[in-house]
Image: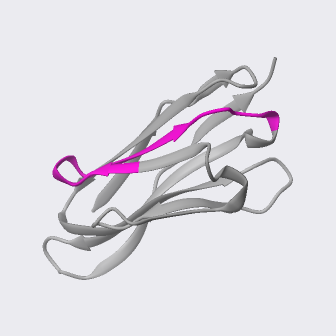
Amino acid sequence: QVQLVESGGGLVQPGGSLRLSCAASGSIGGINDMGWYRQAPGKQRELVGTISRGGGTYYTDSVKGRFTISRDNAKNMVFLQMNTLNPEDTAVYSCYAFVIDGQTWRGSNYWGQGTQVTVSS
């Protein structure tokens, strides 16, 4: 069993910053890609960005230059630094990880429960 838990969401004014964290725990043999999705009210879930085990990153166009994804492989954690936030960034942000189970050695995607980010004055 693998669990992902996010933290760091909240209310921030336009132009502000937030840093989200996500920690994976459980039967982990290894983690390949990690990343973040978000879902705003009434909209489809959107991929924010991903990071490979080696540190290669991908970002959706709307967050390029403002958001940065990083990870700590030793701690099985992924982070999302969000700068210059605007109201359109308001959403529930969820982390994911492709985890190799330490007992079965099978790979699966796991998801966190999500954390609310609200950008408003």
- Vertical arrangement, residue 28 with respect to residue 103, above or below: above
Residue at 81% across, 34% down: 87
Percent x, y of residue 115: 57, 39
55 relative position to 114: left or right: left
**Residue 86: in sight, yes or no?**
yes
Q: Is residue 80 magenta?
A: yes
Residue 54 percent coordinates (x, y): 28, 67
Q: How is the image coloured?
A: one colour
Give the magenta range: 70-87
For the C terminus, the quadrant is top right
> Where's residue 108, x and y in %?
36, 76
From the viewer's perspective, tell me whether residue 1 is left or right of residue 114: left
Q: Quadrant of the N terminus?
A: bottom left
In the foreground, 75 or 17 = 17
Q: Residue at x 55, y 51 (%)?
A: 94
Give the quarter of the image for residue 37. Answer: bottom right
| 21 shown above or below 25 | above
**Residue 97 makes an appearance in the image:** no
Above or below — where is 64 with respect to 27?
above
Residue 86 is a magenta residue: yes
What residue do we see at 76% from left, 25% from top? 14
- Residue 41, above or below 46: above
98 or 50, which is in the foreground? Answer: 50
Which residue corresponds to the image point at 24% horizontal and 74% vertical from the top-left? Answer: 100
Farthest-out residue, front = 65
Q: Position of residue 72 (x, y in %)?
A: 25, 48
Q: Residue 2, located in which quarter of the rendered image?
A: bottom left
Q: Is residue 70 left or right of residue 28?
A: right
